[in-house]
Amino acid sequence: MQTIAPRSRTPRLWQLLLVLLAMTGLFLAGAAPTSAHAALTGSDPKQGAVVDRAPDQVKLTFSEKVAMSDGSVRVLDPSGKRVDTGKTTDLGSNTYGVKLRPGLPDGTFTVAYQVVSADSHPVAGAYTFSIGAPSDTKVALPDQEAGGGVVGGLYDAARYLSYAGFILLVGGAAFVLGCWPRGAGVRPVQRLVTAGWVTLTASTLALLLLRAPYTSSGKLGDAFDMAKLGDVLNTKTGAALVSRLLLLAAAALFIAVLFGAYVKREGPGQAAEKKDLTFGLAIGGTVVALGIAATWAMAEHASTGIQAGIAMPVDVLHLLAVAAWLGGLASLLVALFRTTAVEASAVQRFSTVAFTSVVVLAATGTYQAWRQVGSWSALTGTSYGQLLLVKIGLVVVLVGVASVSRRWTGRIATEAASGLAPEAAAAVVVEQRAKQTAHQASRQTSKKPQKKAAAKPAPKPVTVPASGQGGDDDPERSAQLARQQAAMDSAREKRIRDADPYRSGLRRSVLAEAGIAVVLLGVTTFLTTTEPGRTEEEAANATAAAAAQRSGPLQLKVPFDTGGTDGKGTVQLDLDPGRTGSNTLHLYVKRPNGSAFDVPEVKVSLTNEAKDVGPLPVAPDHIATGHWSANGVQVPMAGTWKIAVTVRTSDIDQITVKKNAQIG
């Protein structure tokens, strides 16, 4: 919330937004590519390739270094059996290999991989290549992607709760210590900060247990596999989560002192002691908050890519600014709705903290956007960039609502400067309204005709003696009177809160801010699990570059056997230039001895199954013995194309052979 009292002391809202947009344009204009989520940029054999003989190993190249264990890459034959040795090797230059067993049959093989990128996110995928000729395959890979399913949903929920808990814990404690020291003794505020600690601790434990199935099997039962948990502890993410738990133990001590010894330092002569305790809590709390924020920075996006030494401190500042703003906002909301004791000076102090947080968020957020997006095209053309635009829009709306809170804060400050506290002014209003109501009721009663009645003795007053002071004690009656008194006090306190129009207006605007903040936190959590736009664009460029390198005259040789007399031979297909657009096709049919072979009919078709294009028929003309040709063969798009050649050697003997080829 951006609640600042005197309008003239701080920049206007439009000035702040103008600075934010200018910084965004400056950074994105000079952006350079970096790395974050890993993406597969190359392979050997290539995707969809048909090789004459079985390779010794399969090689995978990623856009960045990945964490890979034995079994991370599986190669499956057409029947679904593993044909790799299971041992992965780091070949350097972000390339990894897995050896294949000898004596592999012809057919289509499936390569499935599941690794963890340097920013802790799982990356999985699969592709096929063929030996000799394509074939049917019985391999059925699960539809669930890495990090998906029930485990993925639970993991994402725990991530959201961990951010929320951090915000409530750090922001709430900072609000109490820096803006409203008397709030340390307010039970609703105590419960809010404690709930933040409990939420962050529980969600961190959940993340630690779910990490193994999240990055590998996807089975919820593996969360309780101690062997796999031990493997997680040896990873960067596991170390960060354990460090967070240790820091949360120190945070528990901080909370105990803040809501215990600190609250008790209220008596006369304890001002100096409380000042020293405040200084100690501020230093200790800052160190713990920095440490907890660093557990995110050391294991996620900020820890990889260019300028990691700058990005990690920037990420820590970004998280602390979010916590100070939104956590303080939540504490202020609780104070406004659950108590009348919050002073106008506390609201003003938080106004300064909130404005400073917005400035820090604008600077650090712009830098992070530069690292993760990298270009204007990625900002508008990728999922990450579009989510980032939604987040920026929410922040703008949030700052706009905060400007409304700013006006209410100014009115409260003016009211406080008049010498009468808002609560006292509201209490006077409540008492005046009560007197007016009683006076009107008495006037209405006096106007009614009075009936004479026999005089009755006045009832004796009933007194309830205090416990332990003599008389007949009635605990049940005393408890009933205590409940009635508490209800009356609560109702009077609510009337006092509602009677202050400025405080009521501030409560409504702060509540609106809190609602937007909840949505904003959800979008931020999605951003942390989405492949950055810059990485997505980089992977697409690498794939296009690899396809361009593969572009050129295409030559395929496929053996055929129609089963009839003189029905064996080889079909050679040449496609020139082997790119999208117009191509020239030459087809040569030869007998096993290499001589030209005239057959009654030859047909060709091209199908791009990934794009659901085709089959596109090609009718070549007979040019010479065993030679057919077609001009102007159109390939509408780059990708993996299945080329089917139908050869008829007699009236009844016919076969269709197929082969996949990458056409750039």
Image: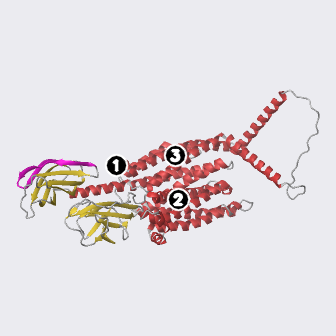
In percent of the image, x 77 and y 35: which residue is there?
437
Crowd tier of the residue under label 1, counting other residues whose Cα lies within 10 Å: few below 14, some 14–19, many 20 or above: few
Query: Residue 175 location in percent, x, y?
Result: 60, 55
Answer left or right for 163 relative to 490: left
Residue 313 in view (yes/no): yes
Q: Amino acid at mark 1?
A: Ser
Q: CA distance from mark 3 to mark 2?
A: 22 Å
Colouring of the image: secondary structure
Is disc 2 placed on a helix, strand or loop? helix
Q: Nearer the viewer, mark 2 or mark 1?
A: 2
Crowd tier of the residue under label 2, counting other residues whose Cα lies within 10 Å: few below 14, some 14–19, many 20 or above: many
Answer left or right for 598 relative to 506: left
| 464 within the magenta span | no
Q: Earlier in the sequence, mark 3 or mark 2?
A: 2
Q: Are marks 3 and 2 in contact (CB under 8 Å)?
A: no
Q: CA distance from mark 2 to mark 1?
A: 32 Å
Is disc 1 placed on a helix, strand or loop? helix
**Rendered image: mark on residue 377:** 1
- Give the magenta-colored segment's residue range: 612-633
| 616 within the magenta span | yes
Q: CA distance from mark 3 to mark 1?
A: 26 Å
Residue 255's quadrant in the figure?
bottom right
Answer left or right for 518 relative to 535: right
In percent of the image, x 64 and y 41: which residue is there?
502
**Rendered image: mark on residue 162:** 2
Q: Are marks 2 and 1 in contact (CB under 8 Å)?
A: no
Crowd tier of the residue under label 3, counting other residues whose Cα lies within 10 Å: few below 14, some 14–19, many 20 or above: many
Q: Considering only vertical position in the picture, is 92 above or below 154?
A: below
Q: Earlier in the sequence, mark 2 or mark 1?
A: 2
- Residue position marked by numbered label 3 in the rendering: 398
Is disc 3 placed on a helix, strand or loop? helix
